[in-house]
Amino acid sequence: MKLEDLSIKGIQDGLRRKIFSALEVTQWYLERIEKIDKKINSYITVCEDQAKEAARRIDRLISNNQLLPPLAGVPMAVKDMFSTCGIRTTAASKILENYIPPYDATCIAKLKEAGAIILGKANHDEFAHGSSGENSAYGPTKNPYDLRRVPGGSSSGSAAAVAAQMAAFATGTDTGGSIRVPAAFCNVVGLKPTYGRVSRYGVIAMASSTDCPGPIARTVEDLASVLEVMAGEDLKDATCPDMPIPNYGKSLGEEIKGLKVGIPKEFFSKGIDRKVLELTKNAISKLEDLGAKTVEVSLPHTEYGLAVYYIIVPSEISANLARYDGIRFGEKREKFGDEVKRRIMMGTYALSSGYYDQYYNRANKVREMIRKDFKSVFEIVDVLVAPTSPTLPWKFGEKVDDPLKMYLSDIFTVTANLSGIPSISVPCGFADDLPVGFQIMGNHFKEKKILEVASAYQRATSWHKILPRV
């Protein structure tokens, strides 16, 4: 039994049968990080001592024949936007390079209580500002499938760590595609939950009205297991509703015959790479083979999504980053990176006197129109399917000097954040030996439905089994 081939369920089965110990599993992952992460740079901080101690606690439960929690002994990477008690949390910025939180983010506390083991803090674009992973103050993360190319951002280290088998799963944050794009570029699955489904408490804020913590894993089944732990009400986050948490994994083996799949025509317009388009259409054909019924639909205000996003999000960024004044905590603002400074300036301008109504208020009105588009479409279809990214992973440096070109990489993902709906990216093939993913979107709090569709597709294909040769 090879540890690198095991899913979350496989790790737990091995622990229960005492084929290996939690310490052995943790040690294997730590050794792999030591061996290959110097090539990829997916971790900012590795927590070797804390990880081993957590593994020993799980082994004591096993030796005493006690009931194991749902993620017992499963090693994870934590995006460095999540506060972790006693573990350095930098937001990939030099401003917080020495910050050690005195508490855990709510979803991290839940994952630890469920027995998951933190291997370390994953690299990402500074304060999650980016689409490529190139903006980290600690150096860029590289794509495990081609070290000359980006892994997608901002959750670059999380996706790369899972793809390169340096974590069984990882946490990420998705403000405009920052879980789904790196998942697509790294051939793993990544879920942006419904806004409020997972608590934001203890997650360093980027844009408060669109930030969504979520999981990244190698399989849909693993993703469902992690989401079940992360989701739920939190009295410390008023946006988390008091709603029951479904058993997300229970119906993953069911057929999707008769399911109505909407194909939004605006997501298949000009500007998409021909090979990405072909693989996405192949994925849609596979869903049809599995019994789904496809219908073309329209989301007419989608064309304004990117413009709306880059008014609202920088505005909220400028407000959230005002706290880093070098007085309360953190270093001086001179240590902000270029992309962070750019977004602060854009947001401050949009919120300034004389421009607030012209930009921010108007953008929020269009946002409501985008939300209504999705609401209308979900009255006639169960899910929507579209490309995750319009392009293949690009080479380092290709878009760094052209911010507008970089921002366009999120053109298919931002509307899910603006409307608050859940969306999952699933591997759907390779072009030029580079991974491609497509996304499945659902109505609010319909994570169970999109997981079922994603699982049906993944069971019928084997793209996710193609691992990088690092």
Image (cartoon, rainbow, N blue to C red):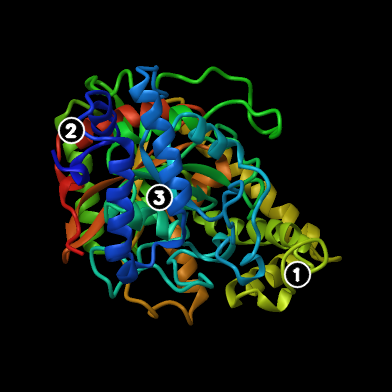
How busy is the neighbourhood of tag 2: few (under 14 within 10 Å), some, or many (20 plus)? some
Q: Are marks 2 and 3 in contact (CB under 8 Å)?
A: no
Q: Amino acid at mark 2?
A: Arg
Residue sitting nearer the eye, 233 or 319:
233
**At which x and y percent is residue 429?**
18, 52
Identified by mark 1, the residue type is Tyr
Residue indicated by mark 1: 349
How many numbered discs sit on the rendered protein? 3
| Residue 382 visible in the displayed image | no
Kindly identify the residue that appears in the image at 54 percent across and 73 percent down.
137
Label 2 sits on a secondary structure element that is helix
- Relative side of 215 to 371, left or right: left
Label whose residue precedes the other's in the sequence (1 or 3): 3
Write down the residue under mark 2: 459
Query: Which element is circle 3 on?
Result: helix
User: Cα distance, mark 2 to mark 3?
Assistant: 20 Å
Asked whether, in this view, residue 244 is left or right of residue 101, the answer is: left
CA–CA distance in space, label 1 to label 2: 48 Å
Residue bearing the label numbered 3: 180
Q: Residues within 10 Å of mark 1 (few under 14, many from 20)?
A: some
Please state the horizontal and vertical placement of residue 112, each as a whole percent of the image: 50, 35
